[in-house]
Amino acid sequence: MPIRPEHRWLYPIDWPEISNIVRFTRAGGRCEHCQRPHGRHVAQLIGANGVWWDAEINVWRDGRGRQLRHAPEFVPLEAIRMTRKPVYLATAHLNHDPTFSGPRWRNLAALCQRCHMIHDGPEHRRRRWWNAFRRRALGDLFSGRYS
């Protein structure tokens, strides 16, 4: 995901190089949480909360990238869907602070779209609440109702 222009100043000048090292050198082109491969379409089980087929080693994996202990013996085609877009890795800040990447980039992780959204969900909810709270507070301050 591209960096918004208003947030570009938070990132180091060599961010594209750092991001490539984290995604492709350190992570080997796979999501560090679920092991989905970068740039490929993935077959998923419908309604199975992240279960997907790893075609490289021919196993079903769960949403955390672990092999299923009890893999389904038969899966009808109606229960499988392919991802609409290929899996793309993005470099995520694990503490949601783009100004701090940590020593040797320990605060960074290569995550696919699904894992990135799961990781960022609580932070997105917190920011949405904060923005709504701030707007209401400004509205109360300048509305003149409490004069």
Image: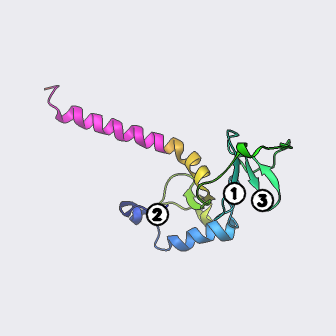
Q: Residues within 10 Å of mark 3 (few under 14, many from 20)?
A: few
CB contact under 8 Å: marks 1 and 2: no
CA distance separating discs 3 and 1: 10 Å
Give left or right: position of 16 versus 128: right
Which amino acid type is marked by label 2? Pro
- Residue 9 rendering spot, x and y as whole percentages: 39, 65
Give the main secondary structure of the magenta stretch.
helix
Which residue is tagged 3? 55
> Which residue: 69% across, 57% down?
36
69 part of magenta stretch = no
Residue that lies at the very extreme toward the top in this rendered image: 146
- Residue 12 rendering spot, x and y as whole percentages: 47, 69
Q: What stretch is highlighted in magenta?
A: 124-146
Question: Which tag, 1 or 2, sits closer to the chain's start?
Answer: 2
> Which residue: 17% across, 35% down?
142
Question: Which tag, 3 or 2, sits closer to the chain's start?
Answer: 2
| Of the two numbered discs 3 and 2 in the rendering, the one whose residue sits closer to the viewer | 3
Which residue is tagged 2? 2
Give left or right: position of 141 versus 34: left
Residue 48 lies in what quarter of the image?
top right
In front here: 34 or 21? 34
Q: What mark, if any, has residue 135 been given in the picture?
A: none
CA distance separating discs 1 and 2: 21 Å
Which residue is tagged 1? 36
In front here: 88 or 19? 88
CA distance separating discs 3 and 2: 29 Å
Which amino acid type is marked by label 1? Arg
| Of the two numbered discs 3 and 1 in the rendering, the one whose residue sits closer to the viewer | 3
